[in-house]
């Protein structure tokens, strides 16, 4: 008897949440109020992080700069508070060229297509503002970022030798004809798919 009662008591309550928590994600402009979170993200993402002063300057004085952030919004019916910023990225606009200067996702949230979503959102914004070409530099050893960019259609167009403070070489990547429908349409479709996915919610880290 006692055993069967214990077994019954161990049955999960259907009202309890089972499975991993999911969080819908939102994307929008980075603001000065985010800079504390950006500093944390920088410190865990880059060997030579940008300073608070650099970001402050980018947001307040650089008219060429555009930055976006990703953050988890509290899902309907959950009591858990939404976390702060989990990803950010930005570019500078030089006429018809957008130069992507940074993109980073908090380590615990990586591998969920958030980087790809953010990259496509940056491209969409740059395109809206007249960019025909997107360029960037990436460490030659950064295989994850290289895969992310190559999936979006970026191609290697050269090297900058000893580009980084620790003297590692950079590969220069470029995505051309962004204003052409044949280039943009598949990227826009993928962006829409990922936007729907992020809106439904991705698995949140423990
Ligand atoms: C690069 C970065 C932004 C990618 O963010 P992310 O949200 O993890 O990226 P995604 O989930 O969209 O994945 C992009 C690609 O990397 C792969 N990937 C992601 N995390 C991975 C991991 N831990 N190990 C192996 N591959 C991984 C994905 O499988 C995907 O490749 P695929 O398209 O061939 O499947 C993130 O790793 C990061 O912040 N890195 C530190 C900062 C940095 O290097 N920024 C780029 C500077 S140029």
Image (cartoon, rainbow, N blue to C red):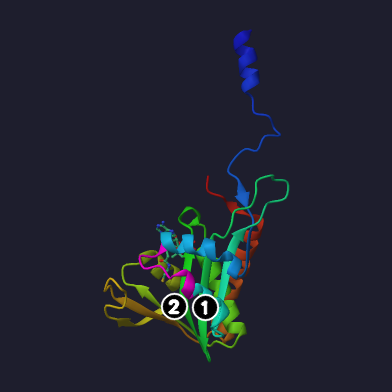
Bounds of the magenta span?
A: 45-54
Measured Cα–Cα span from mark 1 to mark 2:
25 Å
Residue 38 colored in magenta in the image: no
Foreground of the two, 70 or 165: 165
Tell me: is circle 1 under 8 Å from ligand 1.
no
Identify the residue at horizontal 56%, vertical 83% (top origin): 182
Q: Position of residue 185 (x, y in %)?
A: 59, 78
Q: Quadrant of ligand 1?
A: bottom left
Q: Few, some or many C-alpha atoms within 10 Å of disc 2 (few <14, some 14-19, many ≥20)?
A: many
Q: Which residue matches tag 2?
A: 154
Residue 105 seen by the camera: no
Position of residue 161 in the picture relative to residue 41 (left or right): left
Q: Few, some or many C-alpha atoms within 10 Å of disc 1 (few <14, some 14-19, many ≥20)?
A: some
Secondary structure beneath disc 2?
loop
Position of residue 146 in the picture relative to residue 2 (left or right): left
Residue lying farthest bottom?
Answer: 95
Secondary structure beneath disc 1?
helix
Q: Which residue matches tag 1?
A: 58
Identify the residue at horizontal 45%, vertical 56% (top origin): 107
| Viewport quadrant of the N terminus | top right
């Amino acid at each position: 008897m006692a055993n069967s009662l214990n077994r019954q008591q161990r049955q999960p309550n259907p009202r309890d949440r089972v499975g991993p928590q999911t969080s819908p994600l939102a994307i929008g402009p980075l603001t000065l109020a985010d800079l504390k979170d950006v500093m944390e993200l920088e410190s865990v993402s880059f060997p030579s992080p940008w300073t608070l002063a650099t970001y402050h300057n980018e947001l307040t004085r650089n008219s060429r700069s555009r930055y976006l952030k990703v953050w988890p919004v509290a899902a309907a019916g959950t009591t858990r508070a939404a976390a702060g910023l989990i990803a950010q990225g930005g570019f500078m606009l030089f006429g018809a060229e957008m130069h992507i200067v940074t993109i980073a996702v908090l380590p615990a949230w990586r591998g969920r297509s958030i980087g790809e979503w953010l990259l496509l959102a940056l491209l969409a914004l740059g395109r809206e503002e007249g960019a025909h070409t997107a360029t960037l530099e990436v460490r030659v050893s950064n295989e994850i970022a290289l895969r992310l960019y190559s999936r979006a259609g970026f191609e290697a167009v050269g090297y900058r030798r000893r580009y980084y403070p620790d003297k590692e070489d950079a590969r220069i990547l470029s995505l051309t004809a962004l204003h052409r429908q044949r280039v943009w349409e598949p990227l826009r479709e993928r962006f829409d798919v990922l936007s729907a996915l992020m809106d439904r919610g991705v698995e949140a880290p423990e």
